[in-house]
Image (tube, grey):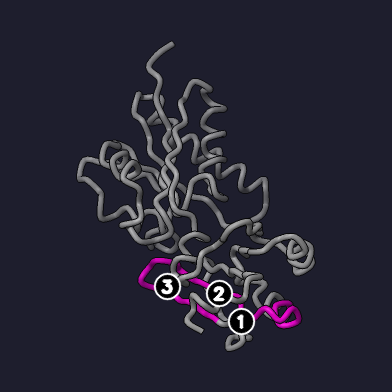
Amino acid sequence: MGLVTTLCGIGVGPGDPELITLKGWRRLQQARVIAFPAGRQGRRGIAEEIISPYKEPQQIYLPLEFPYVLDEDVLEQAWQKAAEEVYAYLAQGSDVVFVSEGDVSFYSTFSYLAAAVQSFDPHIAIEVIPGICSPLAAAASVGVPLTLGSDRLAILPAMYHVEDLTQVWVWADVVVLMKVRSVYGHVWHWLKEQNLLEQAAVVSWATTPQQQIYTPLTDYPELTLPYFSLLIVWKRRPILQNFLGA
């Protein structure tokens, strides 16, 4: 067997470049090839923007196209094409670092990319360096602990329905709704019915210069939100009020 190369996934946090872990930063400094999701319309993607202060002149930057669609066939083709581009460097003996905003194990494209790369060569080593995911960053930005004591946490990804929220709320003490933009109106009315508007917060672009925090949601029946927005709702009203200074 020849030289074993490594595909390393690094979670670089939600946006603030200073939130990269020391291990992730060190691995970035050592990398010859750094791959990341390509931006849109000529702009840098989030991951590329986060790591741009740390770029070294000799490093190769490799943008990979990942479409924002739900069609599994289209996504499969994109993962396969990206894996081919990454594998071209791995096959030459160069390790490749893939950076992703947030954490690479938390709804990240890296998992699909790593699986596709290993389908070419199962001997490719996979290394994972965790990062700060957006729910943790959002709670910190609001100034509220995400969970306390025996709190049960539920995280719903995109494409959930209000019915899903109702079912989860039976047992969860804290619920995070990812990518809330498309369903915000329905969720707001559900929160109103449950008398939870004062115990919820929406955070967009957490930890970045564009960060916006909306709370309590009684004041925001309508919001035009960016793609990277999430909503957190807590059952523990006193905890939320204490931290918000209410």
Magenta span of residues: 190-215
Residue found at the far top of this picture: 1
- Whether 61 is drawn above or below 126: the answer is below
Tag in front: 2 or 3: 2
The label nearer to you, 2 versus 1, is: 2
Q: Which mark is residue 216?
A: none
How far apart are the alpha carbons under marks 3 and 1? Answer: 20 Å
Q: Amino acid at mark 1?
A: Glu
First-in-chain label (3 vs 1): 1
Q: Which residue is mark 2?
A: 240
Q: Position of residue 241 (x, y in %)?
A: 54, 79
Disc 2 and disc 1: Cα gap in Å?
9 Å
Q: Secondary structure at mark 3?
A: loop
Does residue 192 belong to the magenta stretch?
Answer: yes
Q: Position of residue 70 (x, y in %)?
A: 66, 55
- Tell me whether the residue at label 2 lies in contact with that at label 3, contact meaning CB atoms closer than 8 angstroms: no
Numbered disc 1: secondary structure: helix
Residue displayed at 47% across by 72% down: 142
User: Which label sits on residue 211?
Assistant: 3
Displayed quadrant of residue 224: bottom right
Residue 192 place in picture, x, y as percent: 71, 82
- For the residue marked with disc 2, what is the amino acid? Leu
CA neighbours of label 1 inside 10 A, class few (<14), some (14 to 19), many (20+):
some
Q: Amino acid at mark 3?
A: Gln
The answer to whether any part of residue 153 appears in the image is no
Q: Is residue 232 magenta?
A: no
Using the image, determine if residue 58 lies above or below residue 101: above
Secondary element at tag 2: helix
Q: Nearer the viewer, residue 215 or 182?
A: 215
- Check disc 1 and report the residue beneath it: 198
For marks 2 and 3 on the same chain, the one whose residue lies earlier in the sequence: 3
Point 52% across, 39% down: residue: 113
